[in-house]
Image (cartoon, rainbow, N blue to C red):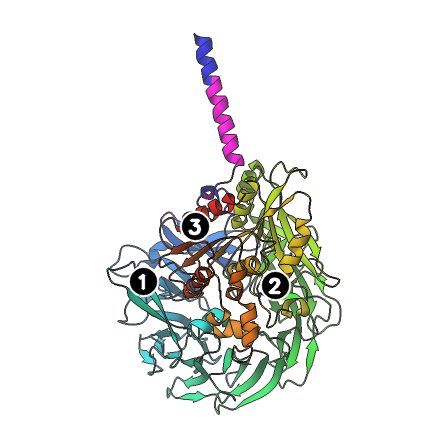
Amino acid sequence: MKFKTSSVILILIFVNVLSQTADDAKLTLERIFYSRDFASERLGRVQWFENGDSYTKLEWNGKYQQIVKYEAATGDTSVIIKSERLIPKNETEPLKINDYSFSDDLKLLLIFTNSQRVWRTNTRGDYWVLNLENWDLKKLGGNTIPSSLMFATFSPDKKFVAYVNKNNLYVENLSNGTINQLTTDGSETIINGTFDWVYEEELSLQNGFRWSPDSRQIAYWQLDASGVGNFNLINNTDSIYSQIIPVQYPKAGTQNSACRVGVINLENKETKWINIPGDSRNNYIARMEWAESSNELLIQQLNRLQNHNYVYIADSKTGKADNIYTELDENAWVEVVDDIKWFKGGKYFTWLSDQNGWNQIYLISRDGKEIKNIINENFDVIEISGIDQKNNLIYYIASPNNPTQKYLYKKSIFGNEKSVLITPIENTGTNNYNISTNFKWAIHNYSTINDPGKSEIITLPNHKTIRILATNENVRTNLRKLDINPVEFFTIKIDNTTSLDAYKILPPNFDENKKYPVLFYVYGEPGSQTVVDGWSRSFLWHQMLAQDGFIIISIDNRGTPAPKGKDFRKSIYKKIGVISSYDQAEAAKQILSWKFVDKEKVGVWGWSGGGSMTLNMLFRYPEIFKFGVSVAPVTDLRFYDTIYEERYMGLPSINAEEYRNSSPITFTNQFEGKLLLIHGTGDDNVHYQNSEKLINELIKYNKQFSFLPYPNRTHGIYEGENTTIHLYNAMTNFILSNK
């Protein structure tokens, strides 16, 4: 009897172990999106102190937040802002910090809390100032309604804070609380100190004012959105009657907001407008900063076609603007330049340009007459990581030999020697750096597509590891238990001059003598690469599909921002959707020649621009692609915004045929396969209109399809309980039904 009982117990334990092992080996949507099994350790936002030898982080102490200081060299920590210091008068709970910043002298702390989303991010909220000498905590804005202030910023002399409220600019005196309203014409159409939808989305502009170095002036953008078309979003679910939500949204070829820059004197509150040539509705003031002086501004103005970037030095007192330099490309578009740094007392500034065929860093004199290529090597600079003005060194990210990866380099700004690789050669993959202000230290984050990597403190320039901050060993342990194959990178040559980077995921227990269905994952537009050797938890969904028998393929076609030179990136000018889908199809033809691929079971999926690409591939190449999932697609390029679409396609009034040929809706009649179309009805970015217009075309041509609308969800389709799991379940079920 005892023997039998023991046997039963042993059997149950054995079965349970097998079950746990099987569960550990299998991916599920719940494990991918809801569990911590594959969530890499996050350091959170790190802010370096001015001395560069220490940094701060926002951390939780039980249920409350505190700000902790870390010494870079030793790792010693100290709580410099305890949670009890964050309790307002007559309150019992500390403020919940969304963001914070210290004054340069470390005597004041500016706290952003109670934030609300405006467009893409939370930029409206409440601001408080904590005096770090007497611990006095004061709310800014006087009696303004909660969550109404935007972009509060200390003046350089730490005596004032400027902010935006209801499209007007204000300055508050920190010593006595006096609030001065600097602009009075702010309204739904006159926007001071911030931006409309399209400027934020496509030019990455949010905070629209800049303190002068002497704290006596503020330069600011003003937009006049009168005449810009309203696109009405409809909310059918939050009340018994529909609610109309108008969004000022200039669609391709329509009227933009007028834009100008003014400089307001804090003493007399008078604005001096900068006299920049050109129609203010058909040019964009894309960047504006003080030019290492309280008397002059450096302004970048794009023409409407965005193939000219005019650089002006503007006098803040007279409003006179001199065009010192123009970046132009008559055959494509040009980019705006961020993080401009000045050298030699304001005599030179840095500039990024692909004028020689590669994205390089240049040094331009203040009068624009001297231009020097600092890098002068045949590869693309991906981004600038930091500029050490004391030692005249520039640190940047590049990958001369592998466009899927990122490495840190340094280069002397005034010397002629070659760039020096800083990242150790064994760290193949994606390397990102947060460099200290004194350029002695950096927080180094490293990963590959198959490994979550690690975070560490290193020294510069020798890249010596001082301390490991995150190992991600828990994720790595869970990955090792999975029954998956590693992602493999490869290249496909589609003609004599064009090679495309790609990756593939093979199913577990892959047998080349069997036939497998294939799913392509695409984006394919200038905004993003998909073939990147860096960790992302979301790619595990592709591994889950591979566990169900699919081969997963992703390819970066021409037109994506892969660091492969100007010609590769800009060859899609006026041909978005045409060249990109052609490249994908040509690559797919080679993949379909693999003996283990089932040619009748080839699918594609993508989101946003990738949703558009999915439709282009299904509609233009129905002989190759048999089914697809298109999420939030642009179906007719005329339905998207001015800045993005005109940058890559020109004006629809001039290039009507190019717009037609690049829009997937044009080729609906050629569709022969199966389609799952998904869209959020509250999408303020790619409007639900796109899917509705496509649906009408599908009906017109008697094309059967599946459609899944998500009420009131935005472009990311994540709002509401259980939305993400529901969405991925729907996509998974559709894909597996075509297996």
Residue 115 placement: quadrant: bottom left
Pick whichever, 189 or 270, lies toward us: 189
Crowd band around label 1 with a 10 angstrom C-alpha radius: few (<14), some (14–19), many (20+): some
Query: Reading the chain from its start, which is encountered first: label 3 or label 2?
Result: 2
Query: Reading the chain from its start, which is encountered first: label 1 or label 3?
Result: 1
Whole-percent x, y for residue 635 in the image: 49, 65
Crowd band around label 3 with a 10 angstrom C-alpha radius: few (<14), some (14–19), many (20+): some
Residue annotated with mark 1: 235
Pick whichever, 677 or 465, lies toward us: 677
Q: Residue at x 53, y 59 (%)?
A: 615
Q: Residue at x 29, y 55 (%)?
A: 93
Of tags 2 and 1, the one toward the viewer is 2
Residue 120 placement: quadrant: bottom left
Crowd band around label 2 with a 10 angstrom C-alpha radius: few (<14), some (14–19), many (20+): many
Residue annotated with mark 3: 727
> What's drawn in magenta, residue-wise?
10-29
Q: Amino acid at mark 3?
A: Leu
Residue 580, disc: 2
